[in-house]
Image (cartoon, rainbow, N blue to C red):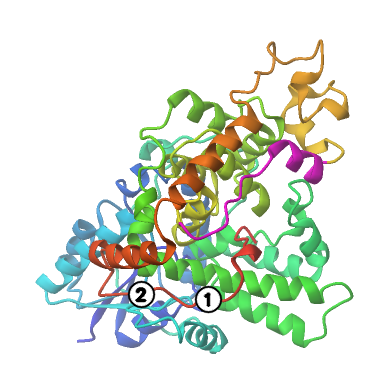
Amino acid sequence: MKPRVICWFKRDLRVQDHPALALAATLGEVLPLYIMEPQMWRQSDASGRHYAFVRECLATLRRDLAALGLPLVVRVGEACGVLEESRANHAITHLVSHEETGNAWSFRRDIAVGTWARSKGLDWREVPQRGVTRKMRGRDRWKAGRDHFVSKAQVDPPQGATAIDARGAAVPVAALMGLSDCCPGRQKGGRDRAEKALQSFLHTRGRTYVRAMSTPLEGAYACSRISPHLAFGTLSIREAVQAVDRARAGGAPHGFAGPYRSFSARLAWRDHFTQKLEDEPPLEWRAMHPDYDDLRPRPCDPVLLDAWARGRTGIPFVDACMRSLRATGWLNFRMRSMVMAVASYHLWLDWRETGAVLARYFTDYEPGIHWPQVQMQSGTTGMNTLRIYNPMKQGLDQDPEGIFTRRWVPELRDVPLKHLQNPWGYKGGPVGRSYPAPIVDVAEAARVARDRVWGLRRQTDPQERTKAIVHKHASRARPRSGGRRKAEKPGDTRQMSFDL
């Protein structure tokens, strides 16, 4: 009798370049399984827009698996219980999945699954699907390992695989999972949309990428928009890297050479920052620099947090960005940095709570990128330059005609352009009536925040502080699957962006 194998799909909702699925097919008869885990969808970083995207991805995954003779089985429940039921009912001997660098909840879930598998004598094989290495033993070889992985030949979908006959459940609607989230402009999920987005970027939309990525108005078109597809795995990082390489090798069309270089660098940055969370899981809940852990009060001031989250701060460009993000699930990289910095510095809100809000809003939320970035923009790393944005200047620089601001803050549509980013100076305007007055004095709040952070930095000698940080992290970190250390940095952190 052939071995019987569960291929457990998680954030890898495709059949193309899917090493775990290919391995499962070589081992024996296959049960392709996706587990809709209610507890996962109750986490503070999960939202209805993520769920809707996943449901669309599952539809194309089901179609593509069926073409291979492998019906997708969807079950609702907690992972260990569903896996045990499948093992008992179908005489399963092997479990195959991709390695996942997820949030703290999925980390604990995978530890529990590992314990269950060992107790049943089940062989669980986790296969890499990106340029992230578990159990890193130093940073020097990370880049070479990552480059080797993305340059390897893609794995073809398995042909002639034998399916295990099993029945699954329908994918529940969001309401049945306790989710509701109005996001009318959200990107749609599925393999077909992933391929279309990548190709249109490489051959049409990406020409102005380097310049337009900084603007909230043009970035929505000029950026690749494949980030949610990478986050939920309808497209592999290797497919994206090799597609860019093929486009470059074929002779970049006029104006595309710079965008191709920049895009390739950002794909590398995705793996680099995911490696950070893989090496240091506490980055999601503990400040990178331990002395900054209690820098801001917790819980956050609920009034300030709600005003920021709903786009009602009275700071027009911040409000426009937050409202746009709530409605579309996407924001370009510079504006992501700005809204996080305003929350952390001007409003003095703790990064863990504001980071969770943004995680729910971003359709392309990827824990490995999100939490290190949130900390960098909040000044809790203890080593990065403070980025305290002036939101009025950002509005003038990135929305000079006021088109984006007026679109998302229609209360200001009649305010003259010269007053648009500081409408409180416009007599007879909507401030205090249809539009709120600023909830903080922007200049004074920035000054106070800067003094607080730099005051903390000056308290300890830098060299001695660095030794203490290394020692403290080494003693407190909870490694995933063994000790892991920091990865090699691929370049200058000032060149970051991960919305792609």
With 407 as the anchor, is 84 left or right in this view? left
Q: Residue at x 69, y 18 (%)?
A: 435
Q: Residue at x 63, y 26 (%)?
A: 441
Is residue 393 a member of the stretch shown in magenta? yes
The residue tagged 2 is 485
Q: Which quadrant holds residue 416?
A: top right
* Residue 168 seen in the current view: no
The crowding category of the residue bearing disc 2, from other C-alpha atoms within 10 Å (few below 14, some 14 to 19, many at least 20), is some
Query: Identity of the amino acid at label 2?
Result: Arg
Q: Residue at x 15, y 67 (%)?
A: 115
Q: Is residue 493 above or below residue 41?
A: below
The residue tagged 1 is 16
The residues bearing labels 1 and 2 have C-alpha atoms spaced at a distance of 31 Å
Disc 1 to disc 2: CB gap under 8 Å: no
Q: Is residue 178 above or below residue 236?
A: above
Q: Nearer the viewer, residue 390 or 14?
A: 390
